[in-house]
Amino acid sequence: MDSEENKFCDLSEIILNENTNSTTQFHKTLKQPKRVLHFSDGDLEEYSEDETDSKSVNKILNHIDPKTLNWLPWAWYQTTSIGNKLLDGCDYMGEWLANFFGITAPKYQFEINEFYRLQALENEMLHKQDLEMGGWNENNKNNLVNNIQ
């Protein structure tokens, strides 16, 4: 009885409401999800991704042989190819220029750096003061014992 309770039953292959006819039988193919995300309120199954769909389109475009195209499709192919390369180059140069001029840094980064510098300086001063005082402070000053005879 215990072994039957511990068994895992996979119900993903069960087809409900199957239409069985003596002449034709309809079997639906089950599409397997690419990714299953588990959340506290349920599970989410992703069957396709936009990224993979666009990659397959790009692969098809890369397999086009421009030598076999007519004049108008060839011109369109060359124009889009050059345009994509030009756009990639502009993106690269834009990122490089933004990094060079410091545009990618936060707006008030100098204030953040100044705060951290002052905080480190204050911590260093407190540490030096603790070392000099050796555990003595104003509250312990009155507890000194003077041996006056």
Image: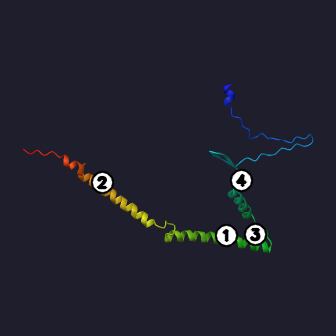
- Looking at the image, residue 44 sits to the left or right of residue 95; the answer is right
- Residue 131 at x, y = what percent? 26, 52
Are dots 4 and 3 in contact, CB under 8 Å? no
Cα gap from disc 4 to disc 2, whole angstroms = 59 Å
Q: Nearer the viewer, mark 4 or mark 2?
A: 2
- For the residue pair 115 and 137, the one nearer the viewer reads as 137
- Looking at the image, residue 118 sits to the left or right of residue 45; the answer is left
Q: In this view, which residue lies farthest toward the top? A: 1
- For the residue pair 82 and 36, the one nearer the viewer reads as 36
The crowding category of the residue bearing disc 1, from other C-alpha atoms within 10 Å (few below 14, some 14 to 19, many at least 20), is few
Residue carrying label 2: 127
User: Of the numbered discs in the image, which one, if any, rests on residue 63?
Assistant: none
Are dots 4 and 1 in contact, CB under 8 Å? no
Are dots 3 and 1 in contact, CB under 8 Å? no
Asked where in the image residue 7 lies, by quadrant, the reply is top right
Asked where in the image residue 56 lies, by quadrant, the reply is bottom right
Element marked by disc 4: loop
Please name the amino acid that badge 4 sits on: Ser
Q: Earlier in the sequence, mark 3 or mark 1?
A: 3
The crowding category of the residue bearing disc 2, from other C-alpha atoms within 10 Å (few below 14, some 14 to 19, many at least 20), is few
Please name the amino acid that badge 1 sits on: Asn
Vertical arrangement, residue 9 with respect to residue 78, above or below: above
Q: Nearer the viewer, mark 3 or mark 1?
A: 1
Cα gap from disc 2 to disc 1, whole angstroms = 59 Å
